[in-house]
Amino acid sequence: MAEDGRRGEDDERGPGAVYQMFVVMEDLLDKLKLLDYEEEVLMKHNMKSLTRHYFASSPYMPSNPGEQFYMFTIIASWLINQAGRPFEQPQEYDDPNATVANILAELRAFGGQVDFPPSKLKAGSGEQVCYVLDRLAEEALKKKGFVWKKPSYPTEEMEEESVMEDDAELTLSKVEEEMTEEPDDFEEDIIDLDALKARTNQNEANVSSKPDDILESNTDAAEWNLEVERVLPQLKVTIRTDNKDWRIHVDQMHQHKEGIESSLKEAKGYLNKLQEEISKTLEKVGSREKYINNQLEHLIQEFRSAQSKLSEAKERYQQGSGGVTERTRVLSEISEELEKVKQEMEEKGSSMTDGAPVVKIKQSLTKLKQEIVQMDIRMGVVEHTLLQAKLKEKSNMTRDMHATNIPEPAIGGY
């Protein structure tokens, strides 16, 4: 069912969606090189450099999920730090679920969309891994202030024209082609045949009027040969081919067309044979499948009935297990209450048989009696002191009274 859903999703996105992660991975590698990851990540952790399709998953490519997941976590943590957010570098033996959750939380903080389960990242490769790293790399480039500029294409320079030297004379057809290709250049070099003919006749007349000894040459043959060798390279006719000529492209197109047609004939024969073999094999497989279904129909019915019985037994077992769990819970509650009652009974029994409280009461009574005796003594001492103080005060008062009542004659005699 998962494979059918994945196929349906790929069909909605288009036939090229399967290969989109390869393009994203190549872009990611370029962005990592712009961030100088080779010195800051690979050399620091003593790792090998990433290949063009390291995080892209394919059945035709070798994969190491453990190594790829560790590399993914290292690069993701480094990119998050480069983007300006503190993130602790994960270790090799950390919980992968917690690590993935932390990375996705940082991605959501950057505004990235996470519409896939986190378990997709634990494989260490795939479309989701490429997407997460590419999104984090974009945030790191934004933090660095990097901006993609429009490409500046170099001005097209004329390629060095290949010079074809040929010692043989030009054929008339080549000269005619050059004349048809560049008629304007040759208009200035058109020879006036009438003037040339008149000049030739004039030269013949002059030669005939001159003496015969002028026709003899006194030039040395060796010097003539040296002069010929010196001037010979300049006398060679060169043909400059233009790579932009449409005739050359047309000839190449015809050649490629013939090659494609010849290859297509051979490949078509092989493909037809392969189609016939596949169709025969499919027919055999279909007939064998029908035969097996007919032979195993009663076994399938028995299996279905056994499955239905098994499901009923599972339901009964679940119901019974539910009742057992409820009863065990009630039993545990009752046992706890029983333990509490036993503990209370033991405490009360020990308190009833223990004589220590009585001894403590007797000791406290004796102590109270001693304290009462001491208090009585103190009270008597206080009463005696009070009595003495009253008597002393009374005697003082009587003395003062006698002193104030002195007879007058005695005072006047002085």
Image (cartoon, grey):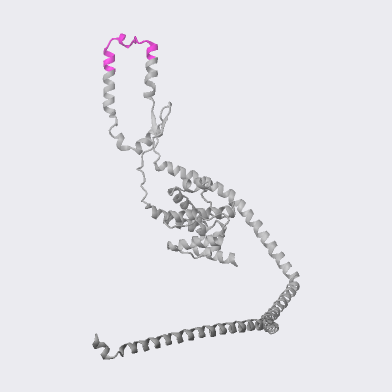
Residue 405 quadrant: bottom left
- Does the stretch in magenta take in 210? yes
Where is residue 37 drawn, in percent x and y? 47, 48
Magenta-colored span: 204-224
Quadrant (top left/top right/bottom left/bottom right) for the C terminus: bottom left
Nearer to us in this view, 137 or 395? 395
Nearer to us in this view, 409 or 384? 409
Quadrant (top left/top right/bottom left/bottom right) for the N terminus: bottom right
**Which residue is at a point 54% across and 85% down the rendered structure image?**
376
Task: Give the residue at the far front of this rendering.
Answer: 413
Q: How many numbered circles are shown?
A: 0
Q: Main secondary structure of the magenta part?
A: helix
Where is residue 286 drawn, in percent x and y? 68, 65
Residue 93 quadrant: bottom right
395 over 288 or under it: above or below: below
Residue 245 quadrant: top left
Where is residue 119 drawn, in percent x and y? 56, 62
Q: Is residue 147 visible?
A: no
- Does the stretch in magenta take in 180? no
**Which residue is at a point 50% across and 58% down the rendered structure image?**
16
**Residue 306 left/right relative to 374:** right
Q: Is residue 402 visible?
A: yes
**Which residue is at a point 37% across and 14% down the rendered structure image?**
224
Nearer to us in this view, 118 or 181? 118
Where is residue 269 drawn, in percent x and y? 61, 51
**Which residue is at a point 28% across and 25% down the rendered structure image?**
196
